[in-house]
Amino acid sequence: MNILSMVLQEHAEEAPNVFALTTNVSAWTLIIFIVLLVVLSRFAFPHILGYAAAREKRIQDALDDAKRQREETEALLAQQRAELANARVEAQALIAEGKTAADKVRAELIERARGEGDAMIQRARTEIERERAQAIDSLRREAVELAIAAAARLTGQRLGTDEDRKLVTDFLGTVQTGAGAAGKTGVGAA
């Protein structure tokens, strides 16, 4: 143990200099570096470089995918804008068509209402004319009855046969025709 303690004492007094370039230390450092480089290049570097290449490939694929998706999105956006513009044009066309159809229906309804109004007026005129003819017939009958009654009083006998009535009716018809030609005055004017 004496020798060991002497060597330690001898070296303990000297402060080791790490930066001192001695052939012994430099040679071992160089040998260890080369061995470590060979071991790392044989076992570690392929894995590290493979991982880096795989990572680079994943990043490039992600970038390519993002670019492709952006292009698809832009294409879809352009397509949707075109469809929206077409939809607006179609909507405006439908609105214009609806307005045209509404105007047409309104015109048809107005025309139908006018036609129905004219028909109602014509029916009313016909009804008035019929009522007027009935009133004239009623007045004639009453006039015939009054004329027969007056003639019966004047003559003092009973006139009521069908021949008498026919005679008075024919007479009133000739009077009315003559009055109608002269401007419908008298009995015909009523």
Image (spheres, grey):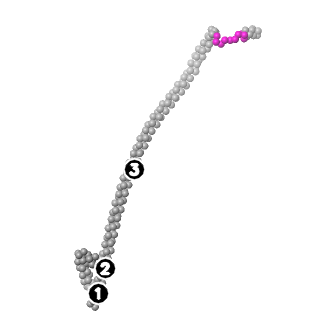
Q: Which of marks 1 and 3 is nearer the N terminus?
A: 3
Residue 17 counted in the magenta span: yes
Which residue is label 1 attached to?
150
Query: Disc 1 on helix, strand or loop?
Result: helix
Which residue is at the front of the view, 153 or 70?
153
Q: Residue 78 carries which label?
A: none
Residue at (31% x, 79% y) in the render: 138
Q: Earlier in the sequence, mark 2 or mark 1?
A: 2
Which residue is label 2 attached to?
139
Q: How far apart are marks 2 and 1 (CA)?
A: 16 Å
Which residue is label 3 attached to?
95
Query: Disc 2 on helix, strand or loop?
Result: helix
Q: Is residue 2 left or right of residue 170?
A: right
Q: Distance between the residues labelled 3 and 2?
A: 64 Å
Q: Do the residues labelled 3 and 2 touch (CB within 8 Å)?
A: no
Q: In this view, does 88 lie to the left or right of 33?
A: left
Q: Point out the residue furthest to the right here.
A: 2
From which residue to which does the magenta span run?
11-20
- Tell me the amino acid under the disc marked 1: Ala
Q: Which of marks 3 and 2 is nearer the N terminus?
A: 3
In the image, residue 108 lies at what x, y percent?
35, 58
In the image, residue 169 lies at what x, y percent?
26, 81
- Tell me the amino acid under the disc marked 3: Ile
Q: Is residue 37 above or below residue 92?
A: above
Q: For label 2, count other residues whose C-alpha is less than 10 Å away and answer few (under 14), some (14-19) or many (20+).
A: some
- Secondary structure, magenta segment, majority class: loop
